[in-house]
Every structure is written in structure tokens, then in C-alpha cells.
Amino acid sequence: LLPNITLGYDIRDTCISENIGLDEAADLIIPGSAEISCSDTNAPLTSRETTLGIIGAVSSRVSRPVASLTRLFKVPQISPASTSPSLSDRDLYTYFYRTVPPDDLQTKAMVDLL
């Protein structure tokens, strides 16, 4: 599909914590910057190239600080579940995208159906 291109991934758990989510995102963008982990896994990290994007978090509470960080480093973030309308502010969250509509649009759609 992509000749001479290798894609990789690195799965992290934010533990639904803003601090851990931010630490893990920072470590993906700036390797070696995170020291907090909620898992017991101490598996060594393999060498990695530049992080091209971050998928997650599934909580708006965690996505907000991560989106602020990804904006600074111009790294896109795509969330499958963060629905807070505040994340729609393109000035604050320039590189944040989501695959679900924000809460206010979901509510409007439900009212329109009634």
C-alpha cells in the first residue's frame, strides 16, 4: 500500500487523568519526557521516528490539555469520543479533530427529530 514506508503505533493509557494524558502525549511528541504510568508494564520502548499524529483521548477532560500540547508542536490529534463543545474552538485547539459531533450538535439533532 505504501512502498518503502513503515507505519508504527504506540498504545498508551491515560487512566482518564489529565496529568497522565498530558505526560503520555508529551512523551510521544518529545520522547523521554513522561515519567508517570498507570500500568505495571515496564517493557522497553523501541526506537521511533517522528510522531505524525495522536488518536485519543476518549474523554474531553483529557483531550483538552493534550490538544493544547499538540497545537504547540503542530501534531494532529483525532478523538473518537471527546464531545465537549469547547473543543470546537479552532483558535485554541487548531490541530484537534474528532469523529463524533460535539454535544450541542447532538442535542440539536435530537430536538430536530422530535
Image (tube, helix red, strand yellow):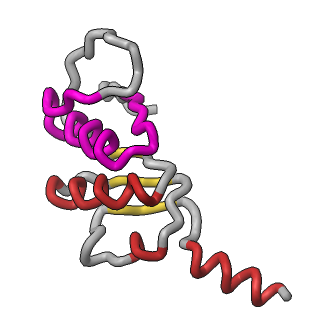
Q: Position of residue 96 (x, y in %)?
A: 36, 62
Q: Residue furthest right?
A: 114
Magenta-drawn stretch contains 34: yes
Magenta-drawn stretch contains 17: yes
Q: Residue at x 39, y 44 (%)?
A: 17
Q: Quadrant of residue 30?
A: top left
Q: Residue at x 34, y 49 (%)?
A: 18
Q: Where 63 falls versus 83 (above or below)?
A: above
Compared across the picture, whether 79 is left or right of 22 comes to: right
Question: Magenta part of the protein: which range?
Answer: 9-36
Q: Where 86 falls versus 8 (above or below)?
A: below
Q: Residue at x 45, y 59 (%)?
A: 60
Compared across the picture, whether 25 is left or right of 12 comes to: left
Position of the C terminus, as image quadrant, is bottom right
Q: How many marks?
A: 0
Q: Quadrant of residue 71?
A: bottom left
Q: Residue at x 14, y 33 (%)?
A: 33
Q: Position of residue 50 (x, y in %)?
A: 19, 36
Q: Where 106 falls versus 69 (above or below)?
A: below
Q: Position of residue 83 (x, y in %)?
A: 53, 66
